[in-house]
Amino acid sequence: MPVPSSGIVSALRSVLAGRPGKIMQDGFLEPRHYANKINRRFISEDFSVRPMFSKTDGNGAATGATGDVNLMRTNRGQYEWHVKGAGQTILVPAYDATTGKGLDFAQDQASTEGHELAFSPNIVTSGGDRGAGAYKVGTDDAFFARLQILSSDWSGVGTLFFGVRKPQAYATALATYTDYAGFKVVNSGALGAVKIETNLAGAGAVLVDTTQTIADNVAAVFEIRVKKDGTVFFRFNDGAPTVGVSGFVFAAGTILIPVSFFLHSADLADNLWYQQFDTAYLPQKAA
């Protein structure tokens, strides 16, 4: 078997920089390290099958009491969601088997009720970066998280946040979390107004208006990109990435997981269709 050229070996070493353990053996890449690096952080969820739901211990039916945490399993992954507000009588999101819109997470039509969906296990201990879809600033390479959502009534959204945050105990208010960055949609007349909200080390929420809006029955795409050094970029509807909030930068060592956080306004969102979620390392020059 031929030995890889020095250029290929050098490139592979660069790709695998920062990973623990022996990555090369006699000039060859160890397969397990390549698989771990490329695949462990990759999730592509299109909500195209009926999910299975349960309590977080994997046994019993999902529940809707305030503060409950449930699991959702699809053919692509396993996610958990936290019940917000006064609780849910519609215990699980509805799958659209008629028109294929995705997964409706609006559940109960009640003001200030909703959910937080974590696309990675919300491990609040020091081992948080072991979760699928979790990243560690300064150790992992640059990454992205992207979510497409459709609603027929964006004015019914009280708060819809999508971005990344530090794993912490689930909170009833977004600003309770100490470290996060992402898009925040709030109602504005008949539209959804798109803003960016960040918080660093518990210094307080910073809100910036993007001046973008979302009309009813139009899908919105939210994407956040985080460089290895913690610099954050925001991308709305697949436009050009832009630095937001005066170059907001997560501290080295911060573990980040992709999440969405939703509450109805008094107007109520008739539906909230989750249609596509993706997260992975970025191509080298994409950040």
Image (spheres, rainbow, N blue to C red):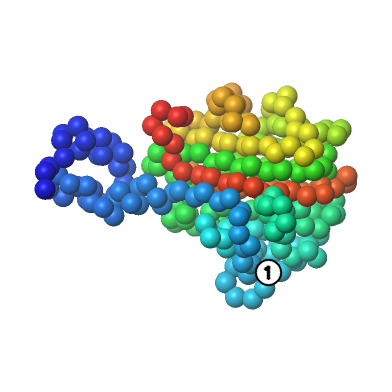
Q: Quadrant of residue 247?
A: top right
Q: Report crowding for label 1: few under 14, some 14 to 19, many 20 or more residues within 10 A (C-alpha).
A: some
Q: Residue furthest bottom?
A: 60
Question: What is the x, y in percent for residue 207?
Answer: 69, 31
Q: Is residue 212 left or right of residue 133?
A: right
Question: Residue 197 or 281: which is nearer the viewer?
Answer: 281
The answer to whether residue 115 is seen in the rendering is no
Q: How many marks?
A: 1
Q: Is residue 109 left or right of residue 245?
A: right
247 to 61, vertically: above or below:
above
Please give the name of the residue rendered at 85% of the width and 34% of the height, measured from the top-left corner: 190
Question: What is the x, y in percent for residue 68?
Answer: 69, 64
Please give the name of the residue rendered at 88% of the width and 46% of the height, measured from the top-left corner: 266
Please give the name of the residue rendered at 15% of the width and 35% of the height, measured from the top-left corner: 5
Q: Is residue 77 left or right of residue 147?
A: left
Q: Residue furthest front?
A: 98
Type of the residue with mark 1 = Ala
214 to 85, vertically: above or below:
above
63 to 208, vertically: above or below:
below
Question: What is the x, y in percent for residue 119?
Answer: 56, 52
Question: What is the x, y in percent for residue 102?
Answer: 67, 52
Question: Residue 201 or 257: which is nearer the viewer?
Answer: 257
Secondary element under disc 1, as helix, strand or loop, is: loop
The answer to whether residue 8 is seen in the rendering is yes
Q: Which residue is mark 1?
A: 62
Please give the name of the residue rendered at 75% of the width and 33% of the height, measured from the top-left corner: 214
